[in-house]
Amino acid sequence: MKILVILGSPRKGNTYRACTLIEETMKTYGDMVFEYLMLRDADLAKCTGCFVCFLKGEEHCPRKDDAPGIEQKMHDADGVIFASPVYGMNVSGLMKVFVDRFSYIFHRPRFFEKKALLLTTTGALGHKDVLKYLDLVARIWGFEVVDPRGTHHPTGGYFPKPPQGI
């Protein structure tokens, strides 16, 4: 089974560590290959709202970036983990650019055979709202959401062992 982790954190902190703990756990259930897509390293242009993708199709988007390859990675995976820290009571800016760049999928969903796991990390508040947003995005895109997870790390540091509930 192939799992794509789309990580919306600008660093390898709590969100990344939580994903690796999920990976370790899932690998105990069978043969799984994990691929990490660090949005900080992806070339994703900000959507300008030009509507070309709606009118002519996303292949005509004037933004030339990594989006087609990223969409192909989602198609090639059996499941996707959407992971974002909570920033300003919402997903990180990196994750928001990702969602906006693929906004054409809201109008033409295509991931009906795929599973999604949602993950947020926060130092205090906001995980429920972020999970609700990611759940809405994933479901409209066609994913079956199998598990939403929010973790708290009030000290802001790395957690040394799996958080409760993972």
Image: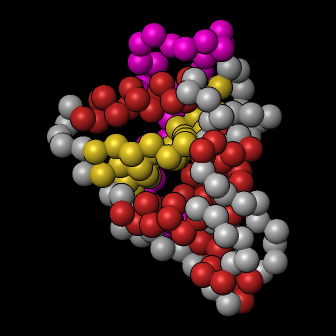
Residue 161 figure quarter? top left
* Magenta stretch prevailing secondary structure: loop
Residue 10 figure quarter? top right
Q: Is residue 72 left or right of residue 34?
A: right
Looking at the image, residue 108 lies above or below residue 2: below
Q: Is residue 149 magenta?
A: yes
Query: In the displayed image of the protein, which residue is found farthest to the bottom?
Result: 56
The region drawn magenta spans 141-166
Who's the residue at 20% across and 31% down the image? Answer: 28
Q: Is residue 38 left or right of residue 104?
A: left
Viewport quadrant of the C terminus? top left
x, y percent for residue 76 = 36, 63
Q: Is residue 5 left or right of residue 88?
A: left
Who's the residue at 36% across and 67% down the image? Answer: 113
Who's the residue at 45% across and 43% down the image? Answer: 36
x, y percent for residue 98 = 65, 55
x, y percent for residue 82 = 52, 46
Who's the residue at 41% across and 18% down the image? Answer: 162
Q: Is residue 138 magenta?
A: no
